[in-house]
């Protein structure tokens, strides 16, 4: 029960890393309030969290809309009286060069991936500070640590997450608020499914994704959830301002398959 008695809010909590984290948090004693645009998937996650012996509730939330993020945080406060952890997890992928991506796609990617982190922190911070401290965990990516040739807009959004993470960690450390980023690599998620469909050959896509890691594997979302749990727990009390890869060694160096031949 590593999060016994803690109150956590998770955006993008209905699929992949968000779902795995919500279930693990609930199993480890946290009361979880999760937000997502997909109501059916959100309610399914709540059911799984409760089946694991925990407590969870769902609020339909668009993480790019200020009033909806504020309502998500407020739901946790009204239900449980305080807030201990904000996991800003909502995000989308965006492949395509700068020449190929439209201005609308740029706006949508930056809003979903980066503005959502700003909004989550904006509405969580006053309550974390008032409660004597807490944690904010932001989902970046290995694309926040390295350049990738085929998705510069996605890289821009994920690098921005690491920047705001470090800045908030410095500013709010004296208020006992720790702020960290996680940087996943190839993880079983909606994004992986989208990549498989885009390539049209799931096997080839998986082999390419795995080849870009030192461990030659695609990890389950539950392994990322374990890192989020650690950062939310008191075991990580001296960690803030970090951007931690959980990517099988992808950012350790250039590996065959990372850069396309053309």
Image (cartoon, rainbow, N blue to C red):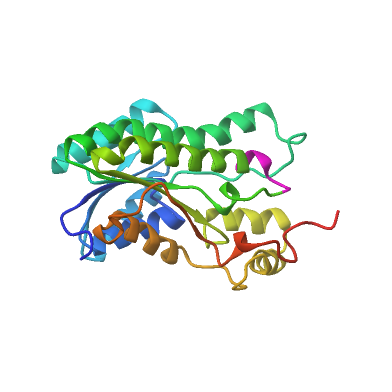
Tell whether position 153 is magenta. yes
Answer whether residue 215 is visible to the viewer in this image. Answer: yes
Give the quadrant of residue 154. Answer: top right
* Point 58% across, 66% down: residue: 249
Q: Is residue 100 left or right of residue 62?
A: right
Question: Residue furthest toward the right?
Answer: 262
Q: What span is in magenta?
A: 149-154
Examine the structure image and report whether residue 209 is included in the region drawn in magenta.
no
- In the displayed structure image, the side of residue 210 where residue 170 appears, left or right: left
Q: Is residue 144 above or below residue 26?
A: above
Q: Residue at x 56, y 59 (%)?
A: 185
The quadrant holding residue 159 is: top right
Asked if residue 10 can be seen in this view, the reply is no
Q: Nearer the viewer, residue 219 or 231?
A: 231
The image position of residue 15, as x and y in percent, is 44, 54
Give residue 223's position: percent from left, percent from top: 43, 66
Q: Residue at x 84, y 58 (%)?
A: 261
């Amino acid at each position: 029960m590593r999060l016994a008695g803690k109150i956590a809010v998770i955006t993008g909590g209905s699929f992949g890393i968000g779902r795995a984290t919500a279930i693990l948090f609930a199993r480890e004693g946290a009361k979880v309030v999760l937000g997502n645009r997909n109501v059916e998937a959100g309610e399914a996650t709540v059911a799984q969290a409760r089946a694991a012996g925990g407590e969870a509730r769902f609020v339909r939330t668009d993480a790019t809309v200020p009033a909806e993020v504020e309502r998500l945080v407020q739901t946790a406060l009204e239900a449980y009286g305080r807030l201990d952890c904000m996991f800003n997890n909502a995000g989308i992928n965006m492949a395509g060069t700068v020449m190929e991506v439209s201005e609308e796609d740029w706006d949508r990617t930056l809003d979903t991936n980066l503005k959502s982190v700003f909004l989550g922190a904006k509405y969580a911070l006053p309550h974390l500070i008032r409660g004597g401290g807490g944690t904010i965990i932001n989902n970046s990516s290995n694309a926040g640590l390295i350049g990738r040739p085929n998705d510069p807009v996605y890289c821009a959004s994920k690098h921005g997450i690491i920047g705001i993470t470090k800045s908030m960690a410095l500013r709010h450390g004296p208020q006992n608020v720790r702020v960290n980023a996680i940087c996943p690599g190839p993880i079983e998620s909606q994004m992986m499914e989208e990549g498989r469909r885009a390539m049209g050959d799931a096997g080839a896509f998986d082999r390419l994704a795995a080849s870009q890691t030192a461990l030659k594997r695609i990890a389950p979302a539950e392994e990322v959830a374990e890192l989020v749990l650690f950062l939310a727990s008191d075991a990580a009390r001296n960690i803030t301002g970090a951007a931690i890869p959980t990517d099988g060694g992808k950012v350790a160096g250039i590996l065959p398959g990372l850069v396309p031949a053309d």
